[in-house]
Image (cartoon, grey):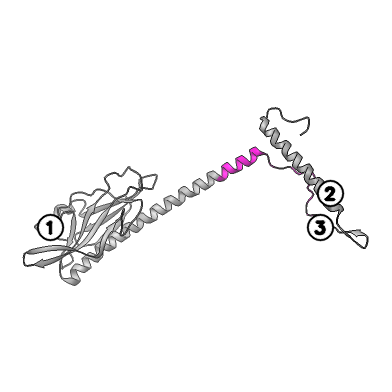
Amino acid sequence: MNGCEDRSRPQWVHEVFAYFDLFTQRTHRSSRAVRATIPTVDRSPLCGVVLANSMGGSKGFTLLELVVVLVIISLMAGLAATDLSSFVGRYRLNSAARELGKVVSDCRMTAISENRDCAVQLVNSDSNLGGPWRANAGRYEVKVAEVTATGVTWASIPGGVSDYSQGPGKQPGVSMEPWAAIAGPIGMSMPSSIVFNPRGFASNPPADFAGGGVVRIVLRNKRASTLEQRVVRIDRGGNVQIAVP
């Protein structure tokens, strides 16, 4: 340290600089001692190529500059992580909406090909949409009608269950919003269901399609900082449309 040191700096800063000065002096002494022991060839000392002159008065970094750089790197890493989280949430939202649309279309084709009613039943929605994104919810099941001597029963098909929270079909951060009342076909005891008959049409009463002639199922990305939804619209003919509100 020289006599022109900045008195406004904290004492510990001066001590750090003093330590580096002492370390530099010892390094220079060690380097001179090593050079003195280098053997000679033809009475000429072995020399290397000087890549840089460490004694040329090059200026190093202060502790404050290093701290500023670390803070900037931390901020950039935080922004990148935020963008990645938003991207992952949007990807899962789109994937969940496409899968639901495919399930509805497949259910309709099952009703036609097997000549029996097939239903997509909404089982569970998220009652706390403003809660943590890990506390997501949403469940639906695909069922087919089985005619027995005592009447009609409904059985889940293999692989016909999707649960966004527990699985199968787990979609972390994606929730199904509470839906408008869906009565289901009269006399079938299938509330909250879209039921397709063997002709491929929905057997639900007109009141179930009161929202613009469609049943609306709304999915939400709870990881997004702003409201982000996908709306799966199903009309009486079994046509599916996915919309961004």
The earlier-in-sequence mark between 1 and 3 is: 3
- As drawn, the residue found furthest toward the left would be 150
Residue at 11 percent across and 59 percent down: it is 188
Q: Quadrant of the N terminus?
A: top right
Mark identifier at residue 49? 3
Nearer to us of marks 1 and 3 is: 3
Q: Position of residue 4 (x, y in %)?
A: 77, 30
The residue labelled by disc 2 is: 32
Nearer to us of marks 3 and 2 is: 2
Q: CA distance from mark 1 to mark 2?
A: 95 Å
Drawn side of residue 43 relative to residue 90, left or right: right
Q: What's the amino acid at mark 2?
A: Arg
Residue at 24 percent across and 57 percent down: it is 140
Q: What's the amino acid at mark 3?
A: Val
The 10 Å Cα crowd at callout 1, few under 14, some 14 to 19, many 20 or more, is: many
The residue labelled by disc 1 is: 185
Q: Position of residue 181 (x, y in %)?
A: 18, 49
Q: Is residue 175 above or below residue 111?
A: above
The 10 Å Cα crowd at callout 3, few under 14, some 14 to 19, many 20 or more, is: few
Mark identifier at residue 130? none
Q: CA distance from mark 3 to mark 2?
A: 16 Å
Helix, strand or loop at mark 2: helix
- As drawn, the residue found furthest toward the bottom would be 113
Q: Is residue 169 above or below residue 11?
A: below
Was residue 65 drawn as part of the magenta stretch in this picture? yes
The earlier-in-sequence mark between 3 and 2 is: 2
Was residue 78 drawn as part of the magenta stretch in this picture? no
Q: Position of residue 90 (x, y in %)?
A: 39, 53
